[in-house]
């Protein structure tokens, strides 16, 4: 028996390859399916089943394409209602894979179809669970994503999740391995550990949601507390996962098409395509196409695209580092952004050589910024998360979280310079690009972000709750 976790850091997502006696099961595959097919072929094995733990919201799974390519059936748990052919398994139904067995455990709560798969080894012993978004390491799946689809409140779903954990998962032995669908950084939970594999026994001892003496009401209150609004692309990804989508090869062929600077400009004007610049932020700061949006591949690229570009059907044109065109289109497709119309041939340098209009971002280093802050009262806007801001921030800074930037557009000065910063410099350049695309150019990026400013001795404070004043 072989079990491999295939973890994708930029999505904080775990897919799984399970093989026994020449037969393979894939759990929650990513959009690009060749790694699974190539792995099975290399081992002389055949993909027999494709298991989905639920209809994912934060990424587009590769289940539809993988099934078409291999002939392997897609398996969902009870209550799933896909538009394509699939096995809708019953609770406790078992699937034989070589010399091992995979048992269906219906665990509703995150969604109504959420299912945990229990792997039994060659001796029939419980070996591991693939818990999807039901159980994370250090947390459980948020119960607010399926409210509209199920006509239930988040409290109703949290109650179901409590029952699922206590009747299906917690009775299992402590040595059972937990393989979750996500790790730290995913928007599908709140307090996930950085580790991606653990034992159930350790989770029982340290995961707040698995306390043995916890009442259902306590669970509901704690699990629903502090939930941030989900990214707007989540329902669109669910729709794609339920109804199907184009083959990844078609997306790559169209999206990586090289477009000359003249055609690039024409297509942008004719289609309303958004120009997405995925180069390092240092390159974008020095020069970029006017009104283009920066979201660099060297950061949390796909989640930020999903959070900030709400419509997955939005036409996109890319400005990429050389050789990264396919990587960019692939990572966009993972979160459902399939409408990339092409890549600027020759990159930004070709645009510049063609004599096209360019723009740049004013940016200063932390040391100089500290000196200037001490001399004048230039407004400072902090685009980190509210929780980061509350933990510690520059004195007199205003918190305008990046994922809510549109709400705060009117807060930025029109007739005076202001500073913008994040933790390390990535998010602040995204914010700068959005503001400049809206015609707000009187901003100054603080290079290196809060970390660099603090290191230089800038005055900081922590959040004080008004009720304690």
Image (cartoon, helix red, strand yellow):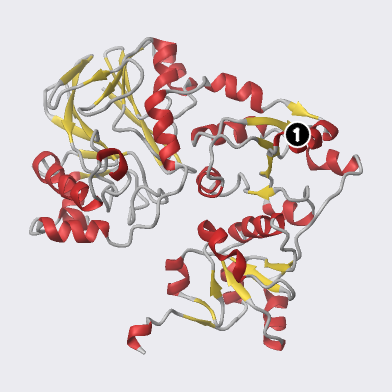
Q: Mark 1 highlights which residue?
A: 270
Q: Nearer the viewer, residue 179 or 58?
A: 58
User: Could you say which quadrant of the image residue 126 lies in?
Assistant: top left
Seen in the image, is 113 located left or right of residue 341?
A: left
Pinpoint residue 189: horizontal percent, then vertical percent: 33, 51
Q: Is residue 125 left or right of residue 460?
A: left
x, y (%) of residue 362? 76, 65
The location of residue 117, given as percent across then percent down, is 22, 30
Compared with 10, 39 (above or below) is: above
Based on the displayed image, in which of its 4 quarters is residue 427 positioned?
bottom right
Quarter the C terminus occupies = bottom left
Instruction: Reply above or below: 264 against 288.
Output: above
Residue nearest the observer in this picture, 150 or 33 = 150
| Kind of element beneath mark 1 | helix
Residue 302 is situated, as x and y percent measured from the top left of the image, at 53, 42
Left or right: where 199 falls relative to 298:
left
């Amino acid at each position: 028996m072989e079990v491999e976790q295939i973890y994708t850091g930029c999505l904080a997502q775990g897919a799984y390859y399970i093989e026994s006696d020449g037969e393979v099961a894939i759990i929650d595959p990513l959009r690009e399916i060749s790694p699974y097919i190539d792995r099975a072929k290399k081992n002389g094995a055949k993909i027999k089943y494709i298991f989905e733990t639920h209809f994912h919201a934060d990424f587009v799974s590769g289940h539809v394409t993988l099934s078409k390519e291999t002939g392997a059936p897609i398996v969902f748990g009870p209550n799933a209602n896909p538009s394509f052919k699939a096995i809708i398994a019953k609770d406790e139904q078992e699937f034989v894979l070589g010399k091992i067995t995979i048992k269906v455990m219906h665990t509703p709560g995150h969604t109504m179809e959420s299912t945990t798969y229990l792997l039994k080894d060659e001796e029939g012993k419980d070996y591991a669970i693939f818990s999807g978004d039901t159980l994370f390491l250090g947390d459980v799946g948020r119960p607010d994503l399926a409210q509209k689809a199920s006509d239930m409140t988040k409290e109703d779903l949290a109650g179901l999740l409590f029952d699922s954990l206590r009747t299906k998962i917690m009775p299992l032995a402590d040595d059972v391995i937990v393989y979750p669908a996500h790790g730290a950084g995913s928007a599908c939970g709140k307090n996930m550990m950085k580790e991606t594999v653990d034992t159930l026994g350790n989770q029982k001892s340290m995961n707040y949601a698995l306390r043995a003496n916890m009442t259902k009401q306590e669970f509901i209150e704690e699990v629903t507390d502090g939930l941030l609004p989900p990214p707007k692309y989540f329902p669109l990804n669910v729709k794609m996962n339920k109804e199907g989508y184009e083959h990844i090869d078609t997306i790559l062929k169209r999206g990586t098409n090289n477009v000359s600077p003249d055609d690039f400009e024409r297509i942008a004007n004719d289609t309303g395509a958004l120009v997405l610049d995925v180069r390092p932020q240092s390159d974008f700061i020095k020069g970029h196409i006017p009104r283009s949006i920066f979201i660099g591949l060297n950061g949390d690229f796909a989640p930020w695209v999903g959070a900030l570009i709400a419509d997955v059907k939005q036409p996109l044109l890319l400005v990429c580092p050389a050789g990264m065109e396919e990587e960019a289109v692939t990572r966009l497709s993972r979160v459902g952004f399939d409408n990339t119309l092409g890549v600027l041939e020759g990159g930004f340098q070709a645009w510049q050589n063609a004599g096209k209009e360019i723009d740049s971002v004013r940016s200063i280093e932390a040391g100089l910024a500290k000196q200037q802050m001490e001399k004048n009262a230039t407004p400072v806007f902090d685009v980190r998360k509210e929780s980061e801001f509350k933990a510690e921030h520059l004195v007199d800074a205003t918190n305008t979280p990046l994922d809510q930037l549109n709400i705060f557009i009117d807060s930025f000065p029109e007739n005076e310079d202001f500073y913008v910063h994040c933790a390390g410099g990535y998010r602040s350049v995204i914010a700068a690009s959005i503001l400049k695309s809206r015609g707000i150019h009187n901003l100054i990026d603080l290079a290196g972000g809060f970390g660099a400013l603090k290191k230089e001795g800038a005055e900081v404070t922590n959040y004080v709750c008004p009720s304690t004043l």
